[in-house]
């Protein structure tokens, strides 16, 4: 099984890592994940596509299938188990390995979404509607204005 170091990075993965370095972005993403039950990788994909001026309309089913394959089938169950592992010293190694598996599944989801993006067309005008449409297409959920405002700040 490849490790995250063995997988070839792509621009979407690099974009996500760069955003994740910001504590402010982490706080916003984790709040969205916890409160709205949204897959952050899908959300990041919507943001990245917006930054690239890619249009996701018409790709909802493909994105949902990728999300089901990686996030629902692997990431969520691994995360549940990892969160159940205690903090005893003898359990920390197991917890670390579960986190590595979770990150690997997320990187594979990134790779699948990036491959999809290679066939997308760019939108000529970057506007706020593209952000809204891409977030809905990528996550399958609508965001309120407060969350969209936070996401605009992250992209700025």
Image (tube, rainbow, N blue to C red):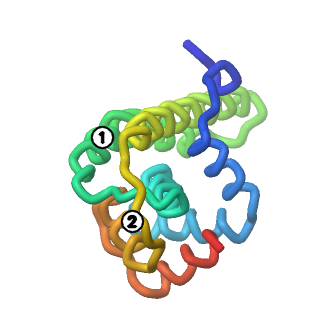
**Label 2: few (<14), some (14–19) or many (≥20) C-alpha neighbours in 10 Å:** many
Residue at disc 1, secondary structure = helix
Q: Residue at x 37, y 51 (%)?
A: 121
Is residue 87 found left or right of 128 in the rendered image?
right
Which is in the foreground here, disc 2 or disc 1?
Answer: 2
Classify residue 82 by image quadrant.
Answer: top right
Residue at disc 2, secondary structure = helix
Pointer 2: what residue? 135
Q: Position of residue 149 (x, y in %)?
A: 53, 83
Residue 14's place in the image compared with 44, above or below, is: above
Q: CA distance from mark 2 to mark 1?
A: 17 Å
Q: Quadrant of the C terminus?
A: bottom right
Can you name the residue that lies furthest to the top here? 1
Can you name the residue that lies furthest to the front here? 124
Pointer 1: what residue? 68
Q: Position of residue 39 (x, y in %)?
A: 43, 54
**In the rendered structure, are the residues bearing label 2 and label 1 in contact, judged by CB atoms less than 8 Å apart?**
no
Q: Looking at the image, is mark 2 or mark 1 earlier in the sequence? A: 1
Classify residue 89 by image quadrant.
Answer: top right
Residue 23's place in the image compared with 17, above or below, is: below
Q: Residue at x 63, y 78 (%)?
A: 153
Out of 90 and 68, give the one closest to the viewer: 68
The tag on residue 27 is none
Classify residue 92 by image quadrant.
Answer: top right
Residue 78's place in the image compared with 6, above or below, is: below
């Amino acid at each position: 099984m490849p490790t995250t170091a063995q997988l070839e990075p792509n621009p979407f993965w690099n974009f996500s890592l760069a955003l994740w370095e910001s504590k402010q972005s982490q706080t916003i993403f984790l709040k969205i994940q916890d409160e709205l039950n949204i897959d952050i990788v899908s959300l990041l994909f919507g943001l990245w596509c917006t930054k690239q001026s890619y249009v996701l309309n018409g790709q909802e089913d493909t994105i949902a299938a990728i999300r089901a394959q990686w996030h629902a089938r692997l990431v969520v169950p691994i995360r549940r188990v990892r969160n159940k592992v205690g903090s005893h010293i003898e359990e920390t190694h197991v917890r670390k390995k579960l986190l590595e598996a979770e990150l690997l599944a997320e990187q594979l989801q990134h790779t699948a979404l990036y491959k999809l993006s290679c066939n997308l067309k760019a939108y000529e005008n970057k506007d706020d509607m593209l952000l809204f449409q891409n977030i809905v297409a990528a996550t399958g959920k609508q965001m309120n204005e407060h969350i969209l405002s936070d996401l605009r700040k992250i992209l700025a």
